[in-house]
C-alpha cells in the first residue's frame, strides 16, 4: 500500500520522504489506507509516517506559539498534550476547566477575603473534583499531559498548578505560577488594583508585575495549602539552593511550558524511551532552551505548608 510494501528498502525510503514532504495534506489518504493494510510491517511503516507528519506539524505549531504575542498558557500545554494525542481537541480541555470553575463560582463573592476565595476554590478543586498529587507514579510521563491529569485527577506539582491557575484566572483571581526549583508553586497577588489583562508575563519578572505584591503562596500539589514567603525561603534553604528573588515572583508562560517539557523529557528518559525524549528536547531547543539541567519536578520534594 502506498508503495510501502515494496521489497526494495530504497524505494520504501523514497516513498516515505515523499509522503513526509506532503505533510498534513496526505494524512487522510494514509489513515484511510491503514484500515485496509493487513501486512504488519507495512502497517507499522505507515503508522510511523503518520507519527512523523504529526510531529512535523507540532513543531510548526510550537514555533507559531513561540512567535505569538501572548504565548497563551492553555495553548502551550495543549500543544504539549498533542505530542501524544495529535487528535486532541482544545475545546474538551476548556470544557473540563469550565466545569471546575463553575463549582467554585457558585460560592464566590467579591466581598470576601483572598484567603476565603482560595478556600472555596480548594473545595471545588480537591473535594468536589478530587485532584491530588500523583505520589504513586510521580515520574510518569502522564503527569505532563493536561488531558490525562484532567481525566485521572492526579498529576505532578506543575500540571496541578497549571490547571489550578487556569481555573483561578477564569474566576478573575490573580493567581500566577512561581518557578521554584524542584517544586512548582503558585502566588496569589494583591487584588483590586487592575484587571488581569494588564499583566505582562511574557518576560521573566524581576519585580512583582505592576508593583502588585504577593499576598501568599499556594501549594497545589498538597491540597492547596496556603503559606508565606518565609516558608518558601526555608524550603529553598533546606534544599541548599542559592536564593534568587525570581523564585518568589510570577514567571512567564514560556517558562512554564518549557518546564513542563523538561519534566516530560526527564520522564521519557526514566521510562527509557530515548526517541521520545530526544523529540521533546528538539521542541525545547526550538523554544530557545539551553541545557536542561534545572527546575524539573521529577523528584518529589514533599514540601508541606
Image (cartoon, rainbow, N blue to C red):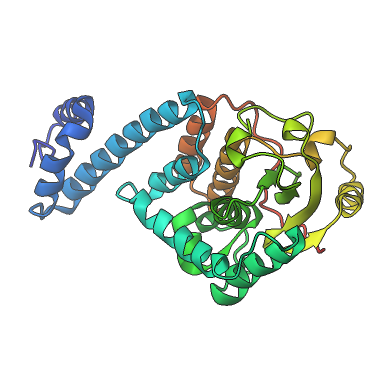
Q: How many marks?
A: 0
Q: Quadrant of residue 276?
A: top left
Residue at 60% of width from left, 52% of height from top?
Answer: 165
Is 248 placed above or below 270 here? above
Residue at 49% of width from left, 36% of height from top?
Answer: 278
Residue at 89% of width from left, 55% of height from top?
Answer: 231
Relative horizontal placement of residue 252, taking residue 276 as reference (left or right): right
Relative horizontal placement of residue 47, taking residue 268 as reference (left or right): left
x then y, percent, for residue 253? 59, 37
x then y, percent, for residue 179? 71, 42
Name the foreground residue: 133 vs 187: 187
Q: Quadrant of residue 193?
A: top right
Q: Residue furthest bottom?
A: 127
Q: Residue furthest front?
A: 111
Is 287 placed above or below 256 here? above
Residue at 43% of width from left, 41% of height from top?
Answer: 79
Name the foreground residue: 273 vs 208: 208
Q: In which quadrant of the rendered image does the C terminus lie?
A: bottom right
x then y, percent, for residue 250? 71, 39
Q: In which quadrant of the rendered image does the N terminus lie?
A: top left
Let me know if residue 134 appears in the view: no
Name the foreground residue: 118 vs 87: 118
Let me know if residue 193 appears in the view: yes
x then y, percent, for residue 52? 30, 36
Amino acid at each position: 500500500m502506498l508503495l510501502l510494501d515494496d521489497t526494495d528498502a530504497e524505494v520504501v525510503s523514497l516513498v516515505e520522504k515523499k509522503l513526509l514532504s506532503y505533510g498534513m495534506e496526505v494524512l487522510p489518504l494514509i489513515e484511510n489506507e491503514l484500515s485496509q493494510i493487513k501486512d504488519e510491517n507495512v502497517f507499522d511503516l505507515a503508522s510511523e509516517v503518520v507519527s512523523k507528519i504529526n510531529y512535523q506539524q507540532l513543531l510548526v505549531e510550537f514555533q507559531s506559539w513561540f512567535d505569538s504575542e501572548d504565548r497563551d498558557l492553555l495553548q502551550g500545554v495543549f500543544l504539549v498534550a498533542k505530542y501524544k494525542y495529535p487528535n486532541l481537541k482544545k475545546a474538551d480541555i476548556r470544557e473540563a476547566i469550565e466545569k471546575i470553575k463553575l463549582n467554585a463560582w457558585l460560592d464566590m463573592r467579591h466581598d470576601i477575603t483572598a484567603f476565603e476565595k482560595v478556600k472555596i476554590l480548594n473545595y471545588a478543586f480537591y473535594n468536589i473534583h478530587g485532584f491530588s498529587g500523583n505520589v504513586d507514579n510521580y515520574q510518569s510521563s502522564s503527569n505532563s499531559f493536561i488531558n490525562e491529569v484532567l481525566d485521572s485527577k492526579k498529576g505532578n506539582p506543575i500540571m496541578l498548578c497549571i490547571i489550578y491557575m487556569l481555573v483561578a484566572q477564569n474566576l478573575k483571581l490573580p493567581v500566577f505560577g512561581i518557578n521554584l526549583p524542584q517544586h512548582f508553586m503558585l502566588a496569589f497577588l494583591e487584588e483590586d488594583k487592575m484587571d488581569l489583562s494588564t499583566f505582562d508575563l511574557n518576560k521573566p519578572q524581576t519585580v512583582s508585575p505592576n508593583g502588585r505584591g504577593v499576598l501568599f503562596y499556594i501549594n497545589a500539589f498538597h491540597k492547596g495549602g496556603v503559606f508565606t514567603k518565609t516558608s518558601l525561603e526555608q524550603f529553598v534553604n533546606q534544599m541548599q539552593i542559592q536564593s534568587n528573588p525570581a523564585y518568589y515572583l510570577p514567571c512567564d508562560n514560556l517558562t512554564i511550558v518549557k518546564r513542563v517539557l523538561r519534566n516530560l523529557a526527564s520522564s521519557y528518559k526514566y521510562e527509557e524511551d530515548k526517541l521520545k525524549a530526544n523529540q521533546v528536547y528538539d521542541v525545547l531547543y526550538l523554544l530557545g532552551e539551553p541545557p536542561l539541567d534545572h527546575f524539573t519536578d521529577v523528584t518529589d520534594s514533599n514540601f508541606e505548608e
